[in-house]
Image (spheres, rainbow, N blue to C red):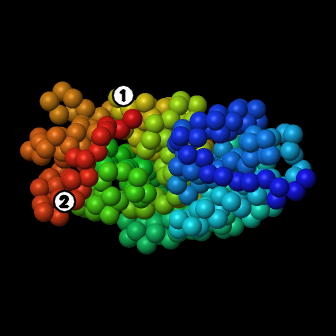
Amino acid sequence: MSDTSYSITSVGPSDHYIRAEVDALLEQEGIHRDRNLDYTAAMLDDDYHVIATGSCFGNTLRCMAVSSAHQGESLMNAIVSHLVEYQYSRGNYHLFLYTKCDSARFFGSLGFSEITRVPEENIVFMENKRTGFHDYLARLAKESAAVLEALQPAEANADGRSRGGKDTRIGAIVMNANPFTLGHRYLVEKAMEACAVLHLFMVSEDASLVPFSVRRQLILDGTKDIPGIIYHDAGSYIISSATFPAYFQKGDNAVIRSQAGLDAKIFTEIAATLHITDRFVGDEPTSLVTGIYNEILSTELPKAGVTCHIIPRKESDGKAISASTVRQYMHDGKLEAIRPLVPDTTYRYFTSPEAASVLEKIRAAEDVVHY
């Protein structure tokens, strides 16, 4: 039977019957349904049963399955075509997808290229640009080259490292900075105590209350007096809706662990390109997501020769400095309370007229605490 006999429909929050059918199909096919989805499509047979499904979150395709009773009918092709058309309609052209290891070849035939895989989680991460990840790595290397040449002594090795002491260490931090606090500043300072060069990846997706343009400028302003930093916009490959959406929204532990494992695997390839030897992360015991992420990094990065340092949080009045606390004060209209928690550059911005729209957004948010 041809897939043209079946209809594809979007599934809304109130479509309880179809949602239950989608969940049953995914479970039947051994796929864990993400909580973080912003669009779901279902293909229905004549008896109104779901025989194929697929979903989106951000610029990713995920949770795709076809009933085993309908294999060989090209239903997955129709689902993928529908999801791609939907993504294009909302302006997303660089697309990513998750699939099971034994399905990677099929999606390759539809124009997706493998970025990496995590066999123990049975996940393959793919994109619809053949050289997308390669081009991203090349961009990072180009951004680094000029800075390394200026920073390193004449006797430096070709990869930018010199002999002996901390000059042999190249560090990395991935920072959302929502917003930039003295805790973030402290993490940078601790990394620079051990490393001569620090790659600072700024999470560039606008999935936070403070927009990226502001977060980026606050990071630059708050660290401009520290030599040896190479700044990178993280793009879609580090902590984004593609690699790690649970960082921004609630999800169950199994999803968080698989996404954190994927993000760690991608970072090891970035580390190899940039000769990164050390990754620095801040301890955050109040955040479930960060706790699991740090655990995964501590396990996986050393396998690739990268030392993972979990740095205790800087404190103020006996409490760890947290961006969540800063946002809560902003939400409650207590701007003066953030002064001891943030650099002067951050405080000046949020007490300026320029920050009015950002503060309005934070005050209107129902929940400003990082999960």
Q: Is residue 152 left or right of residue 304?
A: left
Rendered residue at 53%/42% (across/down): 13
Nearer to the camera, 293 or 87: 87
Residue 9 % position (x, y) = 66, 52
Nearer to the camera, 217 or 93: 93
- Answer above or below: position of 79 versus 264: below
Q: Residue furthest left?
A: 336
The residue where tag 1 is placed is 285
Q: Is residue 70 left or right of residue 53?
A: right
- Answer above or below: position of 298 versus 229: above
Secondary structure of residue under mark 1: loop
Q: Is residue 81 visible?
A: yes
The tag on residue 355 is 2
- Answer above or below: position of 26 versus 128: above
Q: Amino acid at mark 1?
A: Pro
Looking at the rendered image, the quarter that the C terminus falls into is top left
Rendered residue at 32%/44% (across/down): 187
